[in-house]
Amino acid sequence: MFCWCSLIYVLFFLGSFLAIGLLTVCVLLRQLVKFQRRKRSNLNVKHIAFFHPYCNAGGGGERVLWCAIRSLLNRYEDVAVYVYTGDLDATPVDILKKAEGNFNLTLSAERITFVYLSKRRWVEASRYAHFTLLGQSIGSIVLGFEALLKLQPDVFIDTMGYAFTYPIFAFFGGCKIGCYTHYPTISTDMLRRVQSHTQAYNNRGYVAKNPFATWLKIAYYRLFSRVYGWVGRCADTIMVNSTWTENHIVSLWDVPYKTHRVYPPCEVSQLKRLEPLADEQDDRITILSVGQYRPEKDHPLQLQAMYELRTLLNNDEALWNRLRLLIVGSCRDEEDRVRVKNMQDLAKHLSLENSVEFRVNVPYQELLQCYQRAKIGLHCMWNEHFGISVVDCMAAGLIMVANRSGGPLMDIIETSEGSQNGYLAFDAYDYARCIATILYNTPEYNLKIREAARASVDRFSEKEFENGFLRAISPIMD
């Protein structure tokens, strides 16, 4: 008994010592942040820091970042803007030049400072073979501490969805916290997929087939969602990009009074002015897909849809020979480039190599030409949080076929008779059927759909985004 009591006392004192040590480190860190902030030469200038470790990726999330920064600089004169980035191989000039080239934006380089972070690898999914959500979230805490130690802002705005950084900047940095959430880290839809034993990119086959593994993953997801809700509530103002995201964030974070729906900025004004161009082969019908080469974009489903379409058009070989699927997207890293190679191999396996073309990291002017030469748009991501590329295609005059879920279903595409501006599909056959319908529609009916689509996208313009963004962040700018 004496030995057990001694062991308990030793463990108690060790635990107390570690707790006191951790508390001391936290207090010292907070005092260091306060000291660094007082050292600033001009306290009248408000320091605004955007947390976007992949700011040079060139996707829809980056368009949000740069449009937000531009609107902030245009509205406030007494602010200094910083961007936390992990793009160590890109200079500030390179990053801004790519942003201007990809998104047709003009940015003031003199008023934007980049804070380079060396620990971005901690938030990369490839680092965590298992418990990826937890691993990336803990990794974002590491990255967040690095960011805070390098710069102590007055206002911290996360534009990538790293909610686990909010307590760090709120409690240790004493910052006002704003966020723009494109996609909840976890959602009830993900939980339902696990419960229904559905195999997907975020629910591997051996988990879907094993009842015990499924039970463990459900318990893990539920616990994670509780913690995710707590860290999310640390934000002072929350922006979401769609009805779908808003419903999930309100359910998880439970702060509807701080949550604002702000549709992401889409370059609709210029795209609406585009005139169709004849393809290099005048009789070719181009189906255009625009999106980053990421697993959730489900490019394999697009190839499967083309395979099904060929079956549907079996008696019309001449029409099939006129069709081409053009997949345009950006690659962030080597993992994305491997994914492109896998898609090319899948196209060959399905005997589609002569009907599918892949283009990677195309400049904005080349993308505009792709819009002008295409007639149909294709987007296959399940539960797409919003769908900027869907809106862009519609603004450019393409007839859009998108997934019957998420943003395209709730905010963008209308399929009811009399107000139809696009098509919604679910599986490969459904996509093929919608494309075949468009191909056999009368030119007059297709023109009606194109005009309805172009007329519906003004609510997603950059101007509407800027107004909504500035209105949402006003409470933390005072």
Image (tube, rainbow, N blue to C red):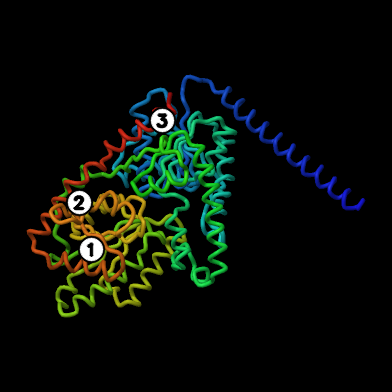
Nearer the N terminus, badge 1 or badge 2?
1
Task: Say above or below: 270 vs 33.
Answer: below
Question: In the image, is residue 200 above or below residue 71?
Answer: below
The residue under the point 48% across, 31% down is: 155
Q: Which mark is residue 111?
A: 3
Left or right of 250: which side holds 120?
A: right
Mark 1 and mark 3: Cα distance apart in space: 41 Å
Sequence-first disc among 2 and 3: 3
Where does label 1 land, which residue? 287
The three-letter code of the residue at mark 3 reads Arg
In this picture, residue 34 sits left or right of residue 157: right
| Residue 121 in view in this figure | no
Q: Which residue is mark 2?
A: 396
The Cα atoms of the two marked residues, 1 and 2, are separated by 13 Å
Q: Residue furthest bottom?
A: 315
**Mark 3 or mark 1, which is nearer the start of the sequence?**
3
The one of 78 and 302 positioned closer to us in this rendering: 302
Q: Nearer the viewer, mark 2 or mark 3?
A: 2
Q: Quadrant of the C terminus?
A: top left
Query: Is disc 1 in contact with disc 3, using a CB cutoff of under 8 Å?
Result: no
Q: Residue furthest front?
A: 1
Residue farthest to the right, as pictured: 2
Which amino acid type is shown beneath numbered disc 2? Ala
Q: Residue at x 64, y 28 (%)?
A: 31
Q: Secondary structure at mark 3?
A: helix
Q: Amino acid at mark 1?
A: Ile
Measured along the vertical axis of the image, is residue 28 above or below residue 276? Answer: above
Question: Given this view, does label 1 or label 3 mark the residue nearer the observer?
Answer: 1
| Residue 279 coordinates in the image, percent (x, y) | 16, 62
